[in-house]
């Protein structure tokens, strides 16, 4: 858990300007709305620790969804078309690719609960993994 002094400043300003130049665009395998659920949101933070899930509205009041990592200057913008989603990504890190890969692996493992997550703390890093899914491993280096 972050202390208040460590908490990230919420992304604000003209979000369409921040997402104007995407490096890639593709169909999303999962709806970004899955991040409204607790466990997927937790796994997303392990996969992309600096990312913030942002909900906004455009001038017409239509909902807009984004992932931003201000430190890495990366973004994912989500566009809905009926039941399907398109993700546009830009910056040095493909945020949604990392998050989506973790969420698909988690679903493939049977969507284990939080009690299956393990943590090892060392002087150099925090290591996380899910017992039932060998592909669900993250290491966050301490700077």
Image (tube, grey):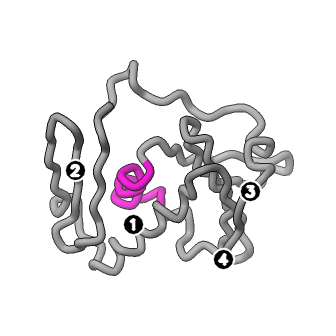
Looking at the image, tell me whether mark 2 or mark 3 is earlier in sequence order: 3
Between disc 4 and disc 1, the foreground one is 1
Residue appearing at x 60%, y 72% in the figure: 28
Q: Which region is colored magenta?
A: 35-48
Residue under numbered circle 2: 127
Residue appearing at x 56%, y 32% in the figure: 10
Looking at the image, tell me whether mark 2 or mark 1 is earlier in sequence order: 1
Number of the label disc, if any, that sits on residue 102:
1
Gap in angstroms between the C-alphas marked 2 and 3: 31 Å
Q: In which quarter of the image is the N terminus?
A: top left
Q: Do the residues labelled 4 and 2 touch (CB within 8 Å)?
A: no
Gap in angstroms between the C-alphas marked 4 and 1: 20 Å
Q: Please provide percent x and percent y for residue 139.
A: 28, 50
Quadrant of residue 63 within the rendered picture: bottom right
Q: Quadrant of the C terminus?
A: top left
Number of the label disc, if any, that sits on residue 22:
3
Q: Please provide percent x and percent y for residue 50.
A: 46, 41
Label 2 secondary element: strand
Label 1 secondary element: helix
Horizontal side of 119 relative to 35 (left or right) equals left
Horizontal side of 107 relative to 52 (left or right) equals left
Number of the label disc, if any, that sits on residue 84:
4
């Amino acid at each position: 858990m972050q202390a208040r002094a460590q908490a990230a400043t919420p992304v604000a300003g003209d979000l369409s300007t921040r997402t104007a130049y995407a490096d890639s665009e593709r169909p999303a395998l999962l709806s970004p709305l899955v991040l409204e659920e607790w466990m997927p949101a937790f796994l997303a933070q392990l996969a992309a620790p600096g990312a913030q899930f942002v909900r906004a509205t455009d001038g017409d009041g239509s909902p807009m969804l984004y992932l931003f990592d201000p430190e890495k200057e990366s973004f994912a913008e989500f566009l809905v078309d009926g039941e399907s989603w398109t993700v546009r990504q830009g910056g040095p890190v493909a945020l949604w690719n990392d998050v989506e890969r973790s969420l698909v692996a988690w679903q493939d493992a049977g969507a284990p609960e939080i009690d299956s997550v393990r943590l090892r703390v060392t002087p150099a890093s925090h290591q996380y993994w899910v017992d039932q899914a060998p592909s669900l491993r993250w290491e966050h280096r301490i700077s």
